[in-house]
Image (spheres, rainbow, N blue to C red):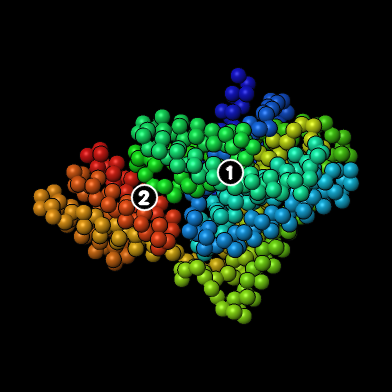
């Protein structure tokens, strides 16, 4: 009963902190981090312990799926170079720099344990960064780079983490691991794709909202567990599963999709709360078990790692940014599409400063076996890095954006105009040949909406329910075709999809 009361109190505290974050314009994960630090100092807090494998499945699988579903394949393709530089190079450099730093401070720490620490604190969490950036409307490309990084860097960092943890037991050989890793990666991609197709067909048959939402979570955890049982990468499998599911329209009915999104958003917040709380509850006993000298030594080393994490990302991002701008100066700017903004030093500085760590780092630290070498130091350091980056970078990002005055661009608005006009034309084409009074009334309404859309205004309006469901499907097909050809991105597609969902729902209610 005590644990249940603690959970209720923590969730209430999270709601209050989220409200405070909105009021002061701060990212809510930063305040959650501070809340976790407070929990670590509360005397008499309950002891909670979960199995390492359960922690990874419980916290990482749904968060990765949610991030994958919201990602845009087109934008990932357009920005693959900067995203790859962050996902591969930045993660690798951070891992190695942290490992070398930890070894320099604690020579007795085994290299695999040091690398595991580096992999734990390497992947930034874009939730806090995007919460701030969307308030100040930065260049669209900066948002897409950070979103792509937050999805894929978890996969690269957690793969390094798994290899390092496995190497602690001995018998690890890179020569033997490399082919196995390649086979695991390919197998994970194939299994993730196949499961997404099968899962989509199954979900399409379920129209009851509670049943569908429960089935979505069962599928999510089932995909992760099956991948682990097959010896594959749960991270890669769940990412491919989410990307494939997002790219296959029609898997969920409109009346199911809208409440499902609300449930998933709520679950993500709850998981963040529980992750910060669980690691806070771990820190209290760790600090109590240490002598005063050890406490000072561990905390001092953790703050050194925090500084290394921040500096390595900044140095790499600005180095890469300078190289790209030099290349553009010498050979000209080549962008995937005209609406994309070329890289700038100010944009690079923002990306470099968006290095806040979060959920994945916490879950990976919690998942370490209790007898892992330097377990307490690694968990304490992960906590310090997460809280430190969220507070230092998260709370200063908005003032930095105001100081830099980055030019705002909004290609999504132009894509929305294009997609909305195309959808309205498809709806009018669907009504051709129908001379009924209802069709004539709906035709006039859609003509007016198209006229307003061409002027750049919002042409949404009400329509006759008897025909609305028919024309909505034609509109869906039109925007799906635009997305398939790459003429609009997923942001515009999702915005129109939501509009059509509400139109469809209102027609069913009428």
Rendering quarter of residue 254: top left
Which circle marks residue 13 in the picture? none
Does 198 sit left or right of 477 as displayed? Answer: right
Residue at mark 1 = 188
Foreground label between 1 and 2 = 1
Residue at 61%, 35% (x, y): give it.
230
Front residue of this view, candidates 338 and 73: 73
In the rendering, at what x and y percent does residue 381 appear? 76, 44
In the rendering, at what x and y percent does residue 379 appear? 75, 39
Does 312 sit left or right of 225 as displayed? Answer: right
Per the model, the C-alpha gap separating discs 1 and 2 is 30 Å
Residue at 69%, 45% (x, y): give it.
180
Residue at 73%, 36% (x, y): give it.
368
Q: How many neighbours does mark 1 have within 10 angstroms: few (below 14), some (14-19), or many (20 or more)? A: many
Front residue of this view, candidates 251 and 189: 189
Q: Is residue 308 above or below residue 176?
A: below
In the rendering, at what x and y percent does residue 396 appear? 63, 56
Residue at 50%, 48% (x, y): give it.
243
Q: What kind of element bears circle 1? A: helix
Does 441 sit left or right of 368 as displayed? Answer: left
In which quadrant is the N terminus drawn?
top right
Look at the image and tell me whether residue 71 can be seen.
Answer: yes
Look at the image and tell me whether residue 57 can be seen.
Answer: no
In the rendering, at what x and y percent does residue 18 appear? 54, 42
In which quadrant is the C terminus drawn?
top left
Q: What kind of element bears circle 2? A: helix
Q: Is residue 262 above or below residue 412?
A: above
Whether label 1 touches label 2, CB < 8 Å: no
Q: How many neighbours does mark 2 have within 10 angstroms: few (below 14), some (14-19), or many (20 or more)? A: many
Residue at mark 2 = 497
């Amino acid at each position: 009963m005590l644990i249940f009361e603690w959970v209720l109190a923590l969730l209430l505290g999270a709601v209050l902190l989220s409200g405070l974050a909105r009021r002061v314009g701060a990212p809510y994960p930063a305040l959650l981090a501070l809340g976790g630090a407070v929990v670590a100092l509360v005397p008499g807090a309950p002891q909670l312990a979960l199995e390492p494998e359960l922690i990874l499945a419980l916290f990482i699988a749904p968060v990765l799926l949610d991030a994958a579903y919201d990602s845009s394949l087109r934008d990932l393709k357009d920005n693959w170079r900067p995203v790859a530089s962050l996902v591969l190079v930045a993660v690798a450099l951070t891992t190695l720099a942290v490992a070398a730093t930890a070894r320099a401070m604690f020579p007795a720490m085994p290299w695999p344990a040091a690398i595991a620490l580096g992999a734990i604190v390497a992947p930034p969490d874009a939730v806090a960064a995007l919460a701030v950036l969307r308030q100040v409307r930065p260049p669209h490309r900066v948002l897409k780079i950070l979103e792509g990084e937050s999805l894929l860097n978890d996969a690269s960092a957690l793969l390094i983490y798994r290899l390092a943890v496995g190497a602690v037991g001995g018998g690890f050989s890179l020569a033997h691991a490399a082919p196995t890793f390649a086979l695991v990666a390919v197998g994970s991609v194939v299994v993730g794709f196949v499961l997404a197709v099968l899962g989509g067909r199954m979900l399409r048959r379920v129209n009851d909202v509670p049943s569908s939402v429960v089935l979505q979570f069962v599928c999510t955890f089932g995909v992760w567990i099956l991948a682990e049982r097959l010896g594959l990468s749960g991270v890669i499998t769940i990412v491919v599963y989410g990307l494939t599911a997002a790219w296959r329209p029609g898997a969920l009915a409109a009346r199911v999709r809208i409440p499902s999104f609300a449930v998933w958003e709520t679950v993500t917040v709850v998981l963040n709360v529980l992750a910060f709380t669980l690691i806070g509850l771990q820190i209290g006993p760790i600090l109590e078990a240490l002598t005063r000298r050890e406490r000072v030594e561990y905390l001092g080393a953790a703050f050194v790692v925090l500084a290394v994490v921040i500096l390595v990302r900044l140095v790499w991002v600005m180095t890469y940014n300078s190289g790209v701008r030099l290349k553009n100066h010498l050979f000209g700017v080549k962008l995937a599409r005209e609406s994309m903004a070329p890289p700038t030093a100010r944009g690079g500085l923002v990306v470099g400063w968006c290095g806040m760590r979060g959920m994945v780092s916490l879950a990976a630290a919690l998942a370490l076996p209790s007898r892992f070498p330097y377990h307490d130091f690694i968990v304490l350091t992960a906590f310090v890095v997460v809280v430190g980056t969220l507070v230092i970078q998260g709370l200063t990002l908005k003032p930095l954006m105001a100081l830099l005055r980055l030019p705002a661009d909004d290609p999504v608005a132009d894509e929305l105009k294009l997609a909305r006009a195309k959808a309205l034309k498809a709806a009018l084409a669907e009504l051709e040949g129908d001379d009924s009074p209802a069709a004539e009334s709906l035709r006039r309404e859609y003509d007016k909406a198209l006229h307003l859309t061409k002027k750049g205004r919002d042409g949404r309006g009400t329509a006759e329910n008897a025909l609305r469901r028919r024309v909505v499907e034609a509109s869906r097909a039109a925007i799906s075709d635009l997305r398939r050809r790459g003429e609009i991105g997923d942001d515009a597609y999702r915005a129109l999809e939501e509009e059509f969902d509400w139109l469809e729902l209102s027609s069913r209610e009428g």
